[in-house]
């Protein structure tokens, strides 16, 4: 594989993200910098820069004497992460309602994105989970933007980057494609009705549904020390 050398670090970041999201790099797996240098035909410097960026985004961890490891998420971390997302998303919508920024243009964009997401379904499942995840990302990002607070938006981006891995794992469930589409539709209905409480309830239900699906797939009773690598290993 050849990499355009104009923005090497960012391109390497995107390539490694894709591998993580597709399950080609699993939780706890070592990322060998020297192998990337050879495979991508680049120098060591942009590879190291890319790994630093990914660590800053919470996707990998650096372990002494072991190097870069794809991050594991315990069930507790999954619950906490999606709780934080619910608080941020509902808070953003509340500010949007108060400022009158929940308008027809915003709703039309959410409808457009959700219909694109629906087209990614093959039956009740997503045919291409990576494409669907990118659309899902945009859907939630549009909602967050209504808060008109760039610091909050930037902070949320970090949360959403990490939860993208968990969301993709949860989509291994039998009906998650169709279910995600319908849950998004419930959020849109609340916004169309001008009801913050209805929209917020739909957001919380949607995010909790993802956590429930993930917990069901990893088969954890109490979530202690569970991570999605077990799920990937079982379904490989």
Image (cartoon, rainbow, N blue to C red):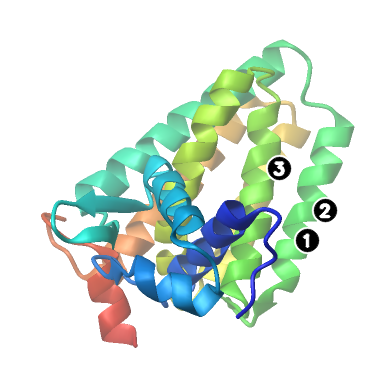
Residue at image position (64%, 69%) is 3
Residue 46 shows up from this direction: yes
Residues under numbered marks 3 and 1 in contact, where contact means CB atoms less than 8 Å apart: no
Disc 1: which residue: 115
Residues under numbered marks 2 and 1 in contact, where contact means CB atoms less than 8 Å apart: yes
Disc 2: which residue: 112
At mark 1, the secondary structure is helix
Single out the residue that lies furthest toward the top. 99
* Residue 188: assigned label: 3
Q: CA distance from mark 3 to mark 1?
A: 12 Å
Residues under numbered marks 3 and 2 in contact, where contact means CB atoms less than 8 Å apart: no
Tell me: 43 left or right of 58.
Answer: right
Res 180 → quadrant: bottom right
At mark 2, the secondary structure is helix
Tell me: 229 left or right of 36.
Answer: left
- Mark 1 Cα within 10 Å, few/some/many (few <14, many 20+)? some
Which of the two discs, 3 and 1, labels the residue nearer the N terminus?
1
Which of the two discs, 3 and 2, labels the residue nearer the N terminus?
2
Residue 182 shows up from this direction: no
Task: Relative to 18, say whether 200 is above or below.
Answer: above
Q: Which of the two residues, 36 or 189, is positioned nearer the viewer here?
A: 36
- Mark 2 Cα within 10 Å, few/some/many (few <14, many 20+)? few
Single out the residue that lies furthest toward the front. 43
Residue 120 on image: x %, y %: 70, 73
Task: Relative to 106, say whether 121 is above or below.
Answer: below
Tell me: 75 left or right of 152.
Answer: left
Q: CA distance from mark 3 to mark 2?
A: 11 Å
Which quarter of the rendering shows the C terminus? bottom left
Res 135 → quadrant: bottom right
Residue at image position (23%, 66%) is 28
């Amino acid at each position: 594989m050849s990499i355009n050398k104009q923005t090497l670090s960012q391109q390497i970041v995107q390539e490694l993200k894709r591998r993580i999201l597709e399950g080609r790099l699993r939780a706890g797996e070592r990322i060998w910098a020297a192998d990337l240098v050879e495979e991508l035909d680049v120098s060591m410097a942009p590879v190291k820069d890319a790994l630093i960026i990914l660590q800053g985004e919470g996707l990998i961890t650096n372990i002494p004497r072991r190097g870069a490891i794809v991050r594991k998420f315990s069930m507790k971390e999954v619950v906490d992460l999606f709780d934080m997302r619910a608080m941020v998303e509902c808070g953003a919508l509340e500010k949007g309602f108060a400022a009158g920024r929940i308008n027809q243009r915003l709703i039309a964009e959410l409808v457009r994105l959700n219909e694109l997401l629906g087209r990614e379904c093959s039956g009740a499942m997503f045919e291409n989970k990576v494409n669907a995840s990118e659309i899902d990302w945009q859907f939630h990002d549009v909602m967050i933007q209504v808060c008109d607070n760039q610091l909050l938006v930037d902070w949320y981006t970090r949360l959403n980057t990490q939860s993208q891995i968990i969301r993709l794992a949860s989509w291994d469930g039998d009906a998650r494609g169709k279910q995600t589409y319908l849950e998004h539709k419930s959020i849109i209905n609340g916004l169309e009705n001008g009801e913050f409480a209805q929209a917020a309830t739909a957001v919380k239900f949607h995010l909790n549904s993802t956590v429930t699906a993930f917990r069901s797939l990893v088969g954890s009773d109490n979530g202690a020390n569970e991570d999605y690598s077990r799920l990937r290993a079982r379904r490989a």
